[in-house]
Amino acid sequence: MRISEFIEKSNLAVTTEELFDLFAMAVKPFGPDLLAFGALTPAAQKKFISEDRPAPAVALNYPEDWVKYYFEKQFYNGTDFVVSLTPTLRKPYLWNKLQETVGLKSNQLMFLNESREAKLHNGLSIPIYGPAGEAYVVSYASSQPNPDIEAHLPTLRTLAYQFYSAFGDL
C-alpha cells in the first residue's frame, strides 16, 4: 500500500480497529509486523486510555503471552525504556542503539533481552507530541530478526504520524 493510499483509507476509517488493521497492512512491506501505539503522559492517557486499554497501551498487536507478562510484571513502571525515555527524546530511535546513545539501566537491558526472546526484534520507536504537550509513541518490531527497519525510517515515520492523526480523529 502506498503512503497516499494509506492516508486516504485511514482518513475514511470508521473504527480504531479498522484503522489499526490498515496501519498494519501499510507497514508490513517494510518489515515490521508487530505494532504498538502508546499514550505516555497523563494528558495523553486521559485522551486515549479506557478500561479495555490499560495504560500506556492504546493499540497493539504484540504476542498475547508477552502482553500478559508485560502487565503482570508492570514493566511500564520504569523498566520499559520506550515508556520512560520516549517523552525525553525528539527523534525516532532503534531499541538496540539506545545503550550507546543514552545508556540503559540494568533492568532496562534485561527488558530489551526479554523482548527479543518474546520475538520483538528490530524495534523502532517514533515519539509523537500532541498540541498540549502530550507524549505518544508508535513502536514497530518484527517477529523475525532480519528486516532492516532502519532503511525504511522516513516512510515508517510518515505512516506513524498519519496513524496518530487519524486515530485522534476517531
Image (tube, rainbow, N blue to C red):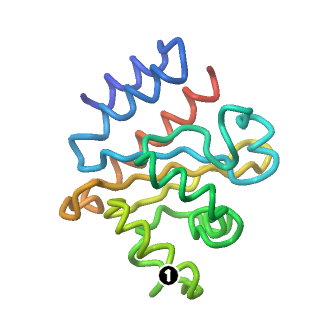
The answer to whether 2 appears left or right of 87 in the picture is: left
SS class of the residue under badge 1?
helix
Viewer-side residue, 89 vs 137? 137
- Give residue 23's position: percent from left, percent from top: 39, 32
Q: In which quarter of the image is the N terminus?
A: top left
Residue ID at (49%, 81%): 109
- Give residue 164's position: percent from left, percent from top: 56, 36
Q: Residue furthest left?
A: 146
Pointer 1 local density, CA inside 10 Å: few below 14, some 14–19, many at least 20 = some
Residue ID at (73%, 33%): 51
Decide: is 98 above or below 28: below
Q: How many labels does the image show?
A: 1
Q: Quadrant of the C terminus?
A: top right
Decide: is 26 above or below 114: above
Viewer-side residue, 156 vs 46? 46
Mark 1 is on which residue type? Leu
The answer to whether 5 appears left or right of 103 in the picture is: left
Which quadrant would residue 50 be assigned to in this image? Answer: top right
Q: Name the residue under label 1.
A: 109
- Give residue 84's position: percent from left, percent from top: 66, 68
- Give residue 40's position: percent from left, percent from top: 69, 53
Which quadrant would residue 2 be assigned to in this image? Answer: top left
Residue ID at (35%, 52%): 154
Residue ID at (37%, 26%): 22
